[in-house]
Structures are given as C-alpha cells and as structure tokens.
Image (cartoon, rainbow, N blue to C red):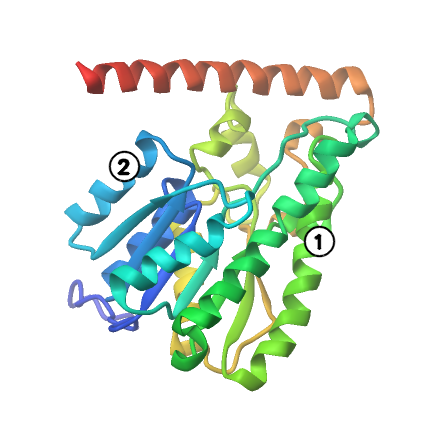
Amino acid sequence: MFDDAGPTEPRRRFEGAVAVITGGSKGIGLAIASRLAREGACVAINSRPGPELERALRQLEKEGAEALAVPGDITQPGIVEGVVEAARACFGRVTHVVQNASVSPHFGPLLSITHGDLGHTLLGNTWPALALLQAALAAGMEEAKGAAVFISSIGARLSSPTIAAYDAAKAALNSLTRALARELGPRGVRLNLVSPGLIATPAAQVVLTEGRDAQEAAILPLQRVGRSDDIAGAVAFLLSDDAAYVTGSDLVIDGGRLLVGGETVDLFGVHDPKRIQEHLDAVGRAFAAQSEAQKAGSGEARR
C-alpha cells in the first residue's frame, strides 16, 4: 500500500553542489535547473542571449534558487569555458554539469544537406559536451567526485526522414559518452546519458500542432506525450548519489516510444518526398506562428 499521509519535504540530495546546465532558459534545461535547485544545488544556466534567459533566471530566483545566468552560444570557441568559469567565480567551484543544448540546422531529406550544415550538426552536438567536461574537471568537479549527464535522444537509435543528421550526431555523442565514462571512472567522476523521446517543450510545439499531440499520445504505451519534468527527475537521479554505481549508461525516457517506432506519427512509413515536404511546411507554419507570438509577447513586456 502507498502512504497517503500527504506531501513530504523535498529531498536535498545536492546540498553544497554547483551545477552548470546548458540550454537552461526553457523546456528541459530549465526544468533540470529548477529540480536541482529545489534539492539544494546552486545552478548556473546558459543559453543564447535574449529575454528567455532573463525570464528563466527570474523564475529560478522566485523559486528561491541561488542561480546565475551566463549568455553565450556554446558552439562557438571559448564560450563553454567562459560559462564554467563564471559559475566557479560565483559559487567557488563546479561539481555537476548537464549538457542539454543542441543544434539542428537542417530539416529535410539527408541527401539535401550541405557540407556546412552537416559539419555544424555533428560538431555542435559533440564538441560542447567534451569542452564542458574538460572545463568542469578543472573547476572542481574532479576534486568533488561529481557527475555529469549529457542529453541525447532516442533518435540516436532510429532513422528519421527529416532530422537524420541530428540523429547521427546524437549517435556520435553516445559513443563519445561511453568512452569518456571509461576515462572518468578512475578519477571518481560519473557520466551518463539521458535519451528523451518527444517531449512537450517550447521547441517541440512546432511538431505537436494540428492534432499531432493527441495522435502521438494515442500510440504510446503510456498514452501521453512527455513533459520536461519527466526528464528532470531522471537527470537528478543520475547526478545524485542514488546512482553512485551507475556510469556509462543511457536512460531512455520516452513513454515507450521505442516500442512502437521513432518518427512522428504522421510520418510513419512515409518515403514520398512530397509528403515529407507537406510535414515540413506545416512545421514551418507553426514555427512562424510561434515566433510571431513570442515577438508580440516581448512587445507587451516592454510596454
């Protein structure tokens, strides 16, 4: 029987910890930062400069977090190191890191990708993770015997007609993670992967329009689209001492999506380029509408 005595005090597994979370201005990254802060960690969040990062910092501070926001595009040289140094300067050290930010500049058939977009996708989803680890080890993580999590994707195990380069980049990240976990183990530092399925984040809303959210939920064994908190809870577990004997693992959080297939439900079994283009056009319309809504919201905030 479960105890129905009522809510309990939140766990405090991260007292004294300092966590750096990239892509922390919204969605999964912000949920991770909030979860770790509630459990006692000081958190430094990073994303590209803009009002979303400022709003995220205000939200964390309102929740009572000791938080820092460090703007910058981590795909650019020196930015990751600057983020870690800012966290160390503010909080004294860095003990945990979460590489959550990702890039996917190309949408559509793989045969249409350019050399530049392929290079940016592969490098942009791998190098920042490695650079983040290198910087964090020097900023206190090795001394603290800390832990790290890289956010991957179930796409690393699948093949998509629209984001195949991104999926390939995540597969490369997974391979790098296993090798890094082996190197880090003797130094007392653990490294694991979390692979989400389709999660209802602000970025994913463009592919959950026109009834696709209900369609996606209907085919999942758990009958719902994932939430950012689903990922945050998994990351908190892997970073905590509850996972003290876990390293080099890949924790899939997908509501059972790998049991039924990988692509969005409207693309199941689709090979016709025209139908794929129709999907991309619909996503483009949703993205444009989302961008206009964000601009309107920013305008309201300034008035």
Residue at x-position 27% and y-position 51%: 68
Q: Quadrant of the C terminus?
A: top left
Q: Is residue 284 left or right of residue 62?
A: right
Counting from the top left corner in percent of width and height, residue 269 is at 78, 32
* Residue, far bottom: 186
Q: In the rendered structure, which amino acid carries the disc numbered 1?
A: Ala
Q: Is residue 218 left or right of residue 230?
A: right
* In the image, residue 153 above or below residue 95: above
Residue 213 visible in rendering: yes
Marks 2 and 1: which is nearer the front? 2
- Residue sitting at 20 percent across and 18 percent down? 302
- In the rendered image, the vertical position of residue 273 relative to residue 54, given as above or below: above
Residue in front for this viewpoint, 175 or 216:
175
Identified at 50% across, 43% down, the residue is 223
User: From what the image shows, is residue 264 above or below residue 233?
Assistant: above
Residue 269 in view of the camera: no
Residue in the image at 40% along x and 13% along y: 292
Mark sitting earlier along the chain (2/1): 2
Looking at the image, is 45 positioned above or below residue 238? above
* Residue type, numbered disc 2: Glu
**Circle 1: is it few (<14), some (14-19), or many (20+) Cα within 10 Å?**
many
Residue situated in front as seen by the camera: 229 or 181: 181
Please give the residue where the numbered disc 2 appears in the rendered image. Answer: 54
Residue 199: which disc?
none
- Residue bearing the label numbered 1: 171
Horizontal and vertical percent position of residue 281: 63, 14
